[in-house]
Image: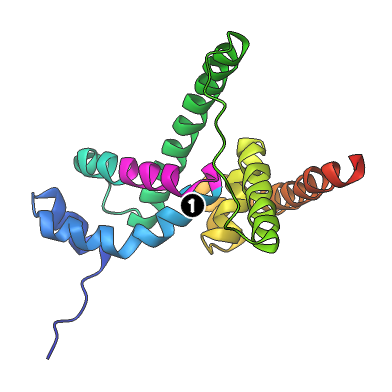
Amino acid sequence: MAAPEQPDAVLAVEAQNGNRQAFDQLVLRHKSQIYRIARHYVGNNDDALDVSQDTFVAAWLGLKRYDTARDFGAWLRTIALNKCRDFGRRQTVRRSVTRLFALLDIRDSAVPSADSVSEQAQEETARLRALEAAIAALPAPHKEALVLTTFAGLSHQQAAQQLGTSVKAVEMKVRRAKQRLEEILKAPAAGQ
């Protein structure tokens, strides 16, 4: 007979006391949701893995400061959102450096061949990348509300608690995020 699954709070206390296996169980429990949040926030699989890993490293290092009276998942999502914001700031710096290199004509211009990929697959990939880029380009408050409710599966009430705001504010931010996504994704078609 398998032992019953321990609640997050119990595992968190054990992890605070140095039990790495308890923390590993918490990681296994929450890694999918943290990855989904990061994936939809940053818009790239590899970057999302990096952000997810950074989230769990920060959680492990900050575990002593975790208040076990709080929901562990909410605490972890807060760390993930902070890591996503950090990533966004680093990307802004990288884009500036990339533009500078482009101006200096230093950047490598080689583009991989797509001969083996069907036209339909290319179009689907392009649409997906456009959506990912559009989500990543949203203002942080709108993106956070959208990612938490749409991709992390939180209710508007849970997202409001996570973000420290009202349910109405979350609803408004999600609505505005969706409107903005629609505008962004329609813009290229209007220009053709």
- The residue carrying mark 1 is 37
Kind of element beneath mark 1: helix
Up the image or down, 176 lies above or below 124; here it is above
Q: Is any atom of residue 157 visible in this view?
A: no
The residue under the point 59% across, 50% down is 114
The image's colour scheme reads rainbow
Of residues 188 and 176, the one nearer the viewer is: 188
Q: Is residue 42 magenta?
A: yes
From the image, which quarter does the N terminus lie in? bottom left
Of residues 107 and 22, the one nearer the viewer is: 107
Q: Give the percent coordinates (x, y) of residue 158.
A: 53, 59
Q: Residue furthest front?
A: 115
Up the image or down, 62 lies above or below 71; here it is above
Q: Which residues are magenta?
A: 41-55
Left or right position of 64 against 184: left
Disc 1 marks which amino acid? Ile
The residue under the point 51% across, 27% down is 91
Q: Main secondary structure of the magenta part?
A: helix
Up the image or down, 142 lies above or below 154; here it is above
Q: Residue furthest left?
A: 18
Q: Give the percent coordinates (x, y) of residue 166.
A: 63, 49
Left or right position of 23 against 182: left
The residue under the point 15% across, 60% down is 22
Instruction: Tell me the quarter of the picture where residue 13 sits.
Output: bottom left
Q: Give the percent coordinates (x, y) of residue 159.
A: 55, 54
From the image, which quarter does the C terminus lie in? top right
Q: Residue furthest bottom?
A: 1
